[in-house]
Image (cartoon, coloured by chain):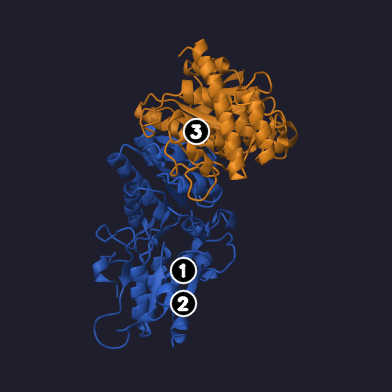
Chain colours: A blue, B orange
Amino acid sequence: MLNPEAKLNPKIFDTDVEQKPIRDGYGEGLVIAGGKDPNVVVLCADLTESTRSEAFAKKFPDRFFEVGVAEQNMATIAAGLGISGKVPFISSYATFSPGRNWEQIRTTIAYNDSNVKIAGHHAGISVGPDGATHQAIEDIATMRVMPNVKVFVPCDAIQAKKTTLAAAQIWGPIYIRFAREKTPVITTNDTPYTPGKADIFWVPSTGSGRGKKPQVAIIACGPLVYQALLAARELEKLGVGSVVLNNHTVKPMDEEKVVEVAKRCGAVVTVEEHQVMGGMGSAVAEALARKFPTPMEFVGMQNVFGESGKPAELIEKYGMGAKDIKTAALRVIKRKK
Amino acid sequence: MELHEEKLKFLEETAVKIREAIIEMLVEAGSGHSAGPLGMADVFTAFYFHILNHDPKRPDWPERDRLILSNGHICPVRYAAMAYAGYFPISELKTLRKIGSRLQGHPHRASLPGLETTSGPLGSGLSQAIGVALAARLNKAKYRVYCFTSDGEHDEGNFWEAVMFAGKNKISNLTVLVDRNNIQIDGFTENVMPLEPLREKYWSFGWNVLEIDGHNFEAIVDAVNEAKAIYEKPTVIIAHTVPGKGVSFMERDYLWHGKPPTKEEAAVAMKELRTLQGRIESEHQ
């Protein structure tokens, strides 16, 4: 059942559950952050509407900089602003930023320790019809490998807004990953959110009978948290108890909570719209290998590129939907000693 | 900010000391770049000892002018100028490129107070300088931003993205100085990737362009003064320099771009520097 402490959207499993693009939360968060702190500035590389930077640009025109189709310049100008007391957010698609400008981010933002927030939009294959060129599925890996850089992956529009506000207040380079499509609103304004603290969204039902003791921990991030919750509900119907952890901060990861759920369940499935190499699942594996080796399965892109298609079709074809998560859960449970 | 004869003499003598320090540092380090630092010694001397509004005892003074070095590999000249200006002890120059040193092989902001940015990977210094200049504009701060670049790094796409942006936004509190020494690692710039007509390129991107002899202190100071007086555009000063300046066997030879002198070569170099290539008698002889 949904963890009551998480105060999630009670209509989450209704067929008409509210859907909203995660990037909307970025736009809303930017305007609030800009109102709170006059040092917040926003840069965009010819994708102002699409990255939802528009509202900020209209409200604070003096603090908005259009750099044109030049992601390397955008990151590096932001580096200069960030070492001069400003709090710059840079907005583009994740394939270009932090894709094309990776070295600029490494040298002038990460190593230079400049207070820049990198907003990578249209991440994951759910970008859909634009195809693989525009589907960032490597960005968590390429960002989390950099010292000084934090990596945040909000699961819905509400959390994206909270994440954007938090990033404006936390000093240092931060990568935030956003998705394009409308996805179910999982959380509410009351859902607790603290960067660096993973939240349990699903727990085994209280009551008696099967499904009481959790047999698998599903650790997810981004919009696929919703698929993880659907899978947990299906598993419960089969009498398999599970825990779903929203692992929204990939770095610095809440290792304590990850180890805790691994100990409690004895098996782990990680779920992310990202390559299974180097992403959130890898971060979980690194932590568990050191602290509590546990059988694991990785749901994500299996060393392949995506393609054009509708988001739902792609999630199904590339094996990241609720059905696949359920299958992975049953598989990993069998591997328990 | 006029340049009196006495000050001019002081600058000339200081530039010699800085060149000597560069040779000593490179020999001690056993690796590093020779030609670029020697070629830019006069420019750095003019800036640290006459042009910059700065305080070596307060490297984080908010009102200081910002000097951003884009081509980080010529950092020995910056380190030497900073040490002689009083940022840190001259003896520390010998730690260049050694473990635990604040003088990293390519400059790192967090390692040494007074460095404005981390640099080395080419083509990104101008963008950073633009960010610093934009922050000054937003804060209505009076400090000026100077960005030194090499000519070779104009090959980088990122560099021209920045040139376009600065032109569009008329960032006039920013002055760029190009070390036009015509060499890069693989050879002469005009063979590797022609940059000319460089003046026209900048001009067409909306910049004010000045061209000077980068070894003439009066010309350097005059150009900076002119740049300060122009509010409609950013200014680029194309400073023609001789790579390896002051050491005859290094001058204009691109093979000296990325290597240090041996002990024997350094001894010859030091003698040449101390006698201004034989033009004067040195008390060291």
Instruction: Provide the residue designation for mark 1.
Output: A281
Q: Label 2 amino acid?
A: Met
Observer-side mark, 2 or 3, equals 3
**Residue shown at the point (55%, 48%) measured from the top left:** A103
Question: Label 3 is found on which chain of the structure?
Answer: B
Callouts 1 and 3 on one subunit: no
Label of residue B68 in the image: 3
Q: CA distance from mark 1 to mark 2?
A: 9 Å
Label of residue B66 in the image: none
Label 2 sits on a secondary structure element that is strand
How far across and down, in percent of the image, does residue A285 sit? 46, 71
Residue A94 falls left or right of residue A35 = right
Q: CA distance from mark 1 to mark 3?
A: 40 Å
Q: Are marks 2 and 3 in contact (CB under 8 Å)?
A: no
How far across and down, in percent of the image, does residue B174 sit? 48, 26
How far across and down, in percent of the image, does residue B50 sit? 47, 20
Residue B148 makes an appearance in the image: yes
Residue B161 makes an appearance in the image: no
Q: Label 3 amino acid?
A: Ile
Q: Quadrant of the C terminus of chain A?
A: bottom left
